[in-house]
Amino acid sequence: MNPLKVTVWGENVHERQSELIRGIYPQGMHNCIADGLNEAPDIQATTATLQEEEHGLTVEKLAETDVLTWWGHRAHGDVSDEIVERVARRVNEGMGLIVLHSGHYAKIFKRLLGTTCSLTWREAGEKERLWVCNPGHAIVQGLGPYFELEHEEMYGEPFGIPTPDEQIFISWFAGGEVFRSGATWRRGAGKIFYFRPGHESYPTYYDANVKLVIKNAVRWARPEAPAWKDAAPNIPVDKAPEKITAWVRP
Ligand code: ZN
């Protein structure tokens, strides 16, 4: 099988503006996420960032992307609507999309889910325990019943998402809240997975379990068929599968 081509998209703003974040992710969060994916011989991950021409998401780049991962937070509004539409089109064609953490408010996530994607939050560096909801799902293979992150931001319900096709994780936080921290949807031929952890001021993307989940997720989201092109062809009467004659209004 050909290696799975993953594009890791990073907003790349916190890392350039904050010494603290740069200290955790000297090459940017996108490179850390890509390095984690590239540990797997069947995955070939490259990166793209907001600052690049067309945010690094040219028609050509997206055409050769099997799965796109998305991390954004501070600059959701700086992502061009044209690029958002381009990504949405590719998801409908079958490209996988993994939306990470604060990407819940990314234009592309809201565009594809069609809801507010709002939630509650608190930044207290508290413990997060992610419970596996479906041990039979491809995304959780290799995990135990749960795993923990010692320091994370809290996200809580209500989470303004459409009811997921599959609930993969539910998180409990030391402060008491719970959150649907892993969920999947399909849009057109494409698979979408939202995965909650990954606040920029904690070293979450170095965590072995988090890396495993993202690897599993990109494999799960791989396109299952050639691109399903957006088209609405007319089928004339003489090409109908069964012989018919057009009814003529009297
Ligand atoms: Zn955050």
Image: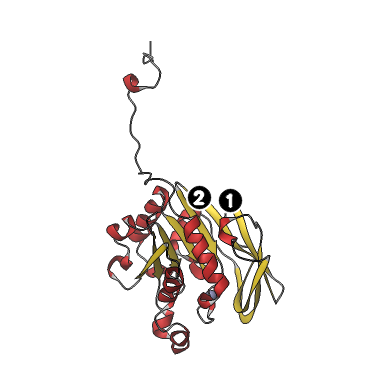
Is 111 located above or below residue 226 in the figure? below
Is 132 located above or below residue 148 in the figure? above
Image position, residue 33 (x, y; %): 45, 72
Residue closer to the observer: 189 or 72: 189
Whole-angstrom CA distance, mark 2 to mark 1, is: 7 Å
Which image quarter: residue 76? bottom left
In-image side of 231 versus 110 (left or right): left
Residue 15, can we see it? yes
Residue on which disc 2 sits: 186
Task: Identify residue type, mark 1.
Answer: Asp
Where disc 2 sits, the SS reads strand
Please say if the residues under marks 2 and 1 sit with CB atoms less than 8 Å apart.
yes
**Does label 2 or label 1 sit earlier along the sequence?**
1
Which image quarter: residue 48? bottom left
Residue closer to the observer: 202 or 33: 33
In-image side of 226 versus 121 (left or right): left
Which image quarter: residue 58? bottom left
Image position, residue 166 (x, y; %): 60, 53
Task: Identify residue type, mark 2.
Answer: Arg
Question: Which numbered dot is residue 165?
Answer: 1
Image position, residue 127 (x, y; %): 66, 78
Residue closer to the observer: 15 or 32: 32
Q: Please tell me which residue is depicted at 62% across the width and 66% down the height of the picture.
A: 143
